[in-house]
Amino acid sequence: MAERNVLKVLKGDAVFPPPIWMMRQAGRYLPEYRETRAKAGSFLDLCYNPELACEVTLQPIRRFGFDASILFSDILVVPHALGRDLRFEEGVGPRMTPISAEEIAALDDSGFHSHLAPVYEAVGLIRKSLPEETTLLGFCGAPWTVATYMIAGRGTPDQAPTRLFGYQNPDALDALLATLADLSADYLAGQVDAGADAVQIFDSWSGVLDEAAFERWCVAPVARLVKRFRERHADIPVIGFPRGAGLAYENYRQQTGVTGLGLDWTVPFEQAKRLQASGAVQGNLDPLRLVAGGEALADGVKAILGGLGDGPLVFNLGHGITPDTPTEHVEEMIRLVRSAQR
Ligand code: CP3
C-alpha cells in the first residue's frame, strides 16, 4: 500500500517536506464547489447527498493534490440527527431553535444513526475514489462547540448565551455535553467503520472560557469522547483542535487523549515546539496570509517550516480557508511547502 504521510506524521514520525491539507478545503473559494452546491439546492441537501458530498470532497484533491481529504459535511448534522431543527441562511450562517434545559433532558437519539446514514455512505464512496496515498479524515464538532450553536441558536462572537446558560444551569449543560460526547464518539467510530483513516474534533469556540469552564466544558467532554471512541478504534489517530486555547494547549493532549494537536495561528513557535515534543502538531498559517499571498504568504510558510519542520508536522492553516482566497495563492502555498529545503 502506498504510504499515507499524514497518518505517518500523526503516529509521531517527522516527514520533510511535511504533508499538507487545509481546513475547509472544499468550499466557496472553489468555482466547482459553487457549481455543485447550486445543483444540490441547499447546503444541507449537499451534506446529505452521498454522491455530491463525495464529489465536493474530491474537488480540492483533484485540483491541488492535498495529502489528506476531509469528509464534506458539517458539525451541526449531529444536533440535526437528534431532531433539532437546522437551517443555513445564505450569507449569514447556521440557525437553530435554542434548546432549553427541559428539552435537553428529553433529547431522543433513537433516529441518530439512520439520519446520518448518508454521511457514512459518503465516507465509503470517498475512500473508494481517493488515491491510495491520500489520508481520509472524518470529523465532528467538540461537544462544547456544538452546544454553543444548540443553545444560542446561531453563531455569536464570544458565546455569551452558552456561558451564561452553563453558569445558571450547570447540570443541564453537563448533561448536554455528555450526550454529545457519547453520540459523537459513536458517530466518529461509524465514520471509521465506513473508511475514514483518522478523525478530527473541531473545538472552534474553546478560546472564550475561563480556566475552570475550559476544564469542565472543553477538556472533560473531549476526554470522554476520545475514551469511548478508543473502545472501538484503539489505533486510529484523533486530532484535537481547541482553537484559541492559549496556555491551556499545554496539557490538552495528555488530558484528553488526542493523538495530534491542531494549532491556531496565535500559538507561538516556542510553545508549539514544546507541544511537538509529545507528538504531532498540525497548523498553523493565518488564513489571511493565504488571502494576501506574496511576501505575507512566503514569510508565514517559512516561519512554520523553520519553527516546526524538524518534528512531526502536518502543514495546515490555523483555521478554515476564507471564501475570498484566490486559488493561485493555494497553489503557491503548496509549491512553497513542497519545494522547501531543510
Ligand atoms: O473542511 C472541510 O472542507 C470539510 C467541511 C466542513 C464544513 N464545516 C463545511 C461548511 C467542516 C469540517 C466544517 C466544520 C464546522 N462547521 C465548524 C468547525 C470548524 C470551524 O470552521 O470553526 C463550525 C463552527 C461549523 C458550523 C458552520 N457551518 C458555520 C458557522 C457555518 C457558516 C459560516 C460559513 O463559512 O458560511 C457553516 C457553513 C459551512 N460549513 C460551509 C461549508 C463549506 C459554507 C456553507 C455554504 O456552502 O453555503
Image (cartoon, helix red, strand yellow):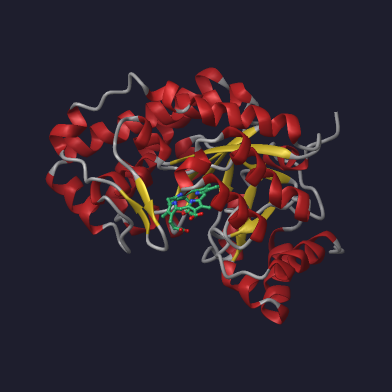
Q: Is residue 15 left or right of residue 211?
A: right
Q: Residue at x 42, y 26 (%)?
A: 115
Q: Is residue 317 left or right of residue 313?
A: left
The image quadrant where one finds the N terminus is: top right
Residue 237 percent location from the top left of the image = 62, 34
Residue 219 percent location from the top left of the image = 39, 41
The image quadrant where one finds the C terminus is: bottom right
Q: Is residue 109 left or right of residue 340?
A: left
Residue 212 percent location from the top left of the image = 28, 48
Is 139 above or below relative to 322? Answer: above
Frontmost residue, 280 versus 265: 265
Where residue 126 sits, quadrant-wise, is: top right
Q: Is residue 252 left or right of residue 216?
A: right
Q: Residue at x 24, y 35 (%)?
A: 174
Q: Residue at x 75, y 34 (%)?
A: 129
Label count reads 0
Question: Would you say residue 312 is visible in this rendering?
Answer: no
Is 100 above or below relative to 324? Answer: above
Question: Would you say residue 134 is visible in this rendering?
Answer: yes
Residue 213 percent location from the top left of the image = 28, 48
Frontmost residue, 225 versus 216: 225
Where residue 77 sits, quadrant-wise, is: top left
